[in-house]
Amino acid sequence: MFAIAVRFDLPDADSAAAFDRLVAETVPGIRAEEPGTLVYTPHLVDGEPLARLFYEVYRDRDAHRDHEARPATAEFLRRVGELVSSVRAELLTPADDGS
């Protein structure tokens, strides 16, 4: 399993609204067309109206590469780049606590 948390900071309310519309257009295709994408969930951030966070879980790193290689994903990222003031991605490794 391979997971990522990606935080997007937006400069203003208009950019946030445009970002949300773009997400609404794009996420259904990711969920429908990527069997290796197990979870792809955008979130609002409590108390930060100009921030969004995506939690993404992939079967493995190859599934993530497949996600990144989709033309629709590339277009999404291009358009997102025009809207955000910053992006921070955290690569996550599950901690096996033995339970």
Image (spheres, rainbow, N blue to C red):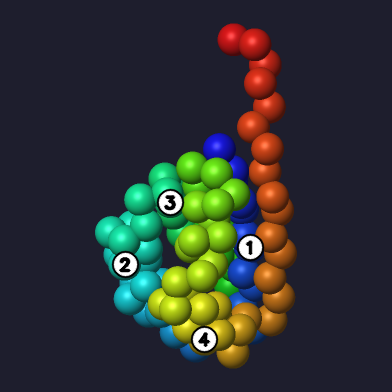
Residue underneath mark 3: 37
Q: Which mark is residue 79?
A: 4
- The label nearer to you, 2 versus 1, is 2
Q: Which residue is located at x 55 percent, y 85 percent?
A: 78
- The label nearer to you, 4 versus 1, is 4
Q: Is residue 80 above or below residue 88?
A: below
Q: CA distance from mark 2 to mark 1?
A: 21 Å
Q: Is residue 40 above or below residue 96?
A: below
Q: Which mark is residue 7?
A: 1
Q: Which residue type carries mark 3?
A: Thr
Comes first in the chain, label 4 or label 2:
2
In-image side of 19 versus 91 (left or right): left
Comes first in the chain, label 3 or label 1:
1
Residue underneath mark 2: 29
Q: Which residue type carries mark 4?
A: Arg
Outermost residue toward the top?
99
Count residues near mark 2 (Cα–Cα under 10 Å), then give few for <14, some for 14-19, many for 20+. few
